[in-house]
Image (tube, rainbow, N blue to C red):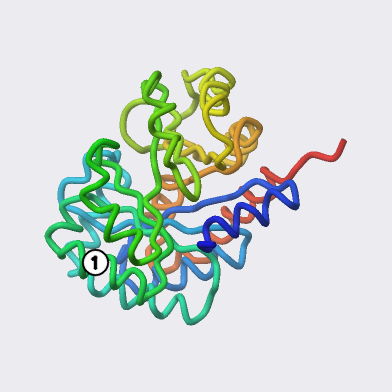
Amino acid sequence: MNRIEQKFAELKSKNEKAVIPFVTAGDPNLETTERLVLAMLESGADLVEIGVPFSDPIAEGPVIQRASQRSLDAGTTLLDIFKTVKRLRSQTEEPLLLMLYLNSIFRFGKDRFFELCADCGVDGVIVPDMPYEERDEILTEAEKNGVLVISMVAPTSNERIAMITAEAKGFLYCVSSTGVTGMRTEFETDFQKFFGAIKKCTDIPCAVGFGISNPEQAKQAARYCDGVIVGSAIVDLVEKYGSNAVPKVADFVRSLKEAVFPEEK
């Protein structure tokens, strides 16, 4: 069983919801990224998404776009990110995922990419610009190396939800609303209807992302699914505090975990 599957099975046995924070690798530098990931895990994060900076991050809003550019300007490479993940893997057994665009995998070489994922301890990849119908482009190499390709659904997926969930593994990344990533004050999506449609098709764990920016939103969203994914609000702290962001981010992740903790009945 992959570490991602183990983690969700463990959380289910304890009736807990997952907190999945995101950071952009190399923002402001990879040494800080390493400290951020470890601090977030120590503060209650259950899985961590590490974003690979890309020059044209079409699914990302301005906060993560700026982080990608800062990282690229600092000279971050995918090979350097793998080295960082390998150091992290020597310090933690918690699930680590890479979130990146398809072009980064192809440019690096998909065989080499997934071999390094396995060697360094990457448990899964999220590829937001890869249509479900194109997943075979990387699925063979991913499966050969024990790396899960996380499937995504959105409120606009409608009849495609059944098809996408049929072969989903690890967890299902549920996009909270249309548009790009970024902090939102409210959600227009009817979560009860959205997750109701998903749960009719699958019992795989569902985590919601895109726009969750504070503990109260995390608490509300977690009532409908198995975990919450928080990116821009964390990257925003990194933008404000740079290499001094670690304790700020740790406190924020701790508040998220406390917010999604099951209410006593």
Q: Residue at x 35, y 25 (%)?
A: 178
In the depicted structure, whether residue 183 falls above or below residue 27: above
The reply, left or right, for residue 206 in relation to residue 99 is right
Q: Residue at x 33, y 64 (%)?
A: 144
Which quarter of the rendering shows the N terminus? bottom right
Q: Residue at x 41, y 72 (%)?
A: 121
Q: Secondary structure at mark 1?
A: helix
Which quarter of the rendering shows the C terminus? top right
The reply, left or right, for residue 12 in relation to residue 265 is left
Q: Residue at x 72, y 46 (%)?
A: 261
Give the amino acid at mark 1.
Phe
Q: Position of residue 118 (x, y in %)?
A: 36, 71
- Of residues 211 and 201, the one drawn nearer to the viewer in this rendering: 201
- Of residues 240 and 234, the one drawn nearer to the viewer in this rendering: 234
Q: Residue furthest right?
A: 265
Name the quadrant containing residue 203: top right
* Category of crowding for the residue at label 1, using alpha-carbon neighbours closer than 10 angstroms: few (below 14), some (14–19), many (at least 20): many
Number of numbered discs:
1
In the depicted structure, whether residue 186 falls above or below residue 138: above
Q: Position of residue 109 (x, y in %)?
A: 15, 64
Q: Residue furthest left?
A: 107
Q: Position of residue 249 (x, y in %)?
A: 51, 58
The reply, left or right, for residue 126 in relation to residue 77 is right
Q: Position of residue 15 (x, y in %)?
A: 74, 46
Residue that carries the numbered disc 1 in the rendered image: 113
